[in-house]
Amino acid sequence: MEQGPAASPKVTEVIPGMHVSKEDFDRAVLEGLISADQAEALWLGLQNRHPNGARFDFTQVMYYGGALIVMSAMGWFMTAAWQHLGGSGMLAVSALYAVCFLLAGRTLWYKEKLKVPGGLLFTMAVWMVPLAIYGFERLTGIWPQGDPGMYRNYHMWIKGSWFFMELGTIIAGLVALRFIRFPFLTAPVAFALWYMSMDVTPLLFGKTAFTWNEGLWVSLWFGLAMLLVSYCIDRRTRDDYAFWGYLFGLAAFSGGLTLLVNDGALNRFLYCLINLGLMTVAILLQRRAFLVFGSLGVVGYLGYLAHKVYKDSLLFPFGLSLIGILVIYLGIRYHRNGQALERFLLARLPAGIRRLLPGERPLPWTRVERNCSLGNHCEGSGVEGCQDDGAKT
């Protein structure tokens, strides 16, 4: 029996940072690329395919704004009056908050199918873990390195006794991620890792009094480790679980690097080169966070030149202004030809290095869709249009 042509693999191309709106289809109609009926049909098809697609509108602002208010109230803005509750009181209140957040989050996540507010409530429950651990340690008197003082000091002073609070937050966040696939749950984990990069210093050196440079070196290497872990998980899943790891990893790395650099001209120049390297990495990894931190480092180097090297130069401000205008011009050129530049850089990378970039990794759901298009068994894959024909008899 003659067979038809083999089905071609189904490939899903994802362009990070690209978001399609109704206005894009309207513009395509005005430019004569598609008809108005086609635009409407495409838009309705996208809405049906992604009914719960992520969008950052006023509702999302309210969701995240409310969550951040609660997290701030139970974190940075904790007053000294809470100390009067004692360890048992703080443990009881934080546990009650966490249980209420978990129950409400479960209802919204599973029953109401409201993933964003439900996921934020689970995140808020994880955020209560350091306060609960602090209350337990205050109650029992068990501290890794002596009494650290009031809870509000957790966000102010580097102390080894905060270590269990950070470790507990990381464990709770990873456990929550095991059951609730919500990317923002990585935020308290990355935040705790950032704090740990500082608070682990006195534990590593076995003393409460450590030198400033010792803390900076620990922060730098810890930040590099966070960046490496984030790179390993980048684009391994449909949702972005690497963002917060990159952000706080860069904060730890760049913070340590910036404060380590002395006033030597060569050291400052190497510092500028490292930050230019971060800006290049931003293109390769398609991560704007690297561009932001790299740009801040370069601006810091220019500030050093202005205030130290050329402080008495009349022409330096004019030259720096020209550089700024040139940067704006290059930004315009990159906006217009960014994809071509990225292709140019990627084409000149060795094939072995190019395969290591997150953008070159096959996404998990594209592998599933490819198997489905080839007629392989794919029951439970969750891919639209992928059907199981049942077992052969």
Image (cartoon, rainbow, N blue to C red):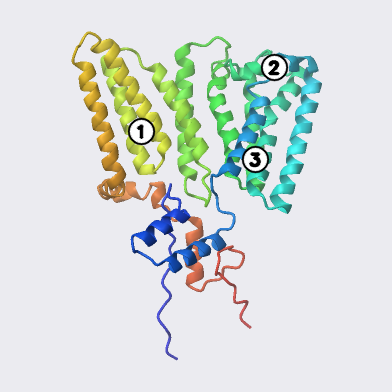
Q: Give coordinates of residue 341: x percent, y percent.
A: 27, 46
Q: Give coordinates of residue 35: x percent, y percent.
A: 40, 67
Q: Earlier in the sequence, mark 2 or mark 3?
A: 2
| Vertical order, 63 against 73 (above or below) | below
- SS at mark 1? helix
Q: How many marks?
A: 3
Q: Nearer the viewer, mark 1 or mark 2?
A: 2
Q: Amino acid at mark 3?
A: Leu
| Vertical order, 291 against 256 (above or below) | below
Q: CA distance from mark 2 to mark 3?
A: 24 Å
Where is the N terminus found, in terms of image quarters?
Answer: bottom left
Kindly indicate whether the residue at mark 3 contacts the one at mark 2 (C-beta within 8 angstroms): no
Q: Residues within 10 Å of mark 1 (few under 14, many from 20)?
A: many
Q: Please give left or right for residue 388 compared with residue 96 in the image.
A: left
Q: Residue at x 39, y 56 (%)?
A: 27
Residue placed under numbered mark 1 in the picture:
278
Q: Residues within 10 Å of mark 2 (few under 14, many from 20)?
A: few
- SS at mark 2? loop
| Vertical order, 190 against 262 (above or below) | below
Q: Give coordinates of residue 19: x percent, y percent.
A: 45, 51
- Give residue 100's quadrant in the image: top right
| Vertical order, 111 against 129 (above or below) | below
Residue placed under numbered mark 3 in the picture:
120
Residue placed under numbered mark 2 in the picture:
79
Kindly indicate whether the residue at mark 2 contacts the one at mark 1 (C-beta within 8 angstroms): no
Q: CA distance from mark 1 to mark 2?
A: 39 Å
Q: Residue at x 35, y 38 (%)?
A: 281
- Give residue 133's quadrant in the image: top right
Q: Residue at x 79, y 17 (%)?
A: 86
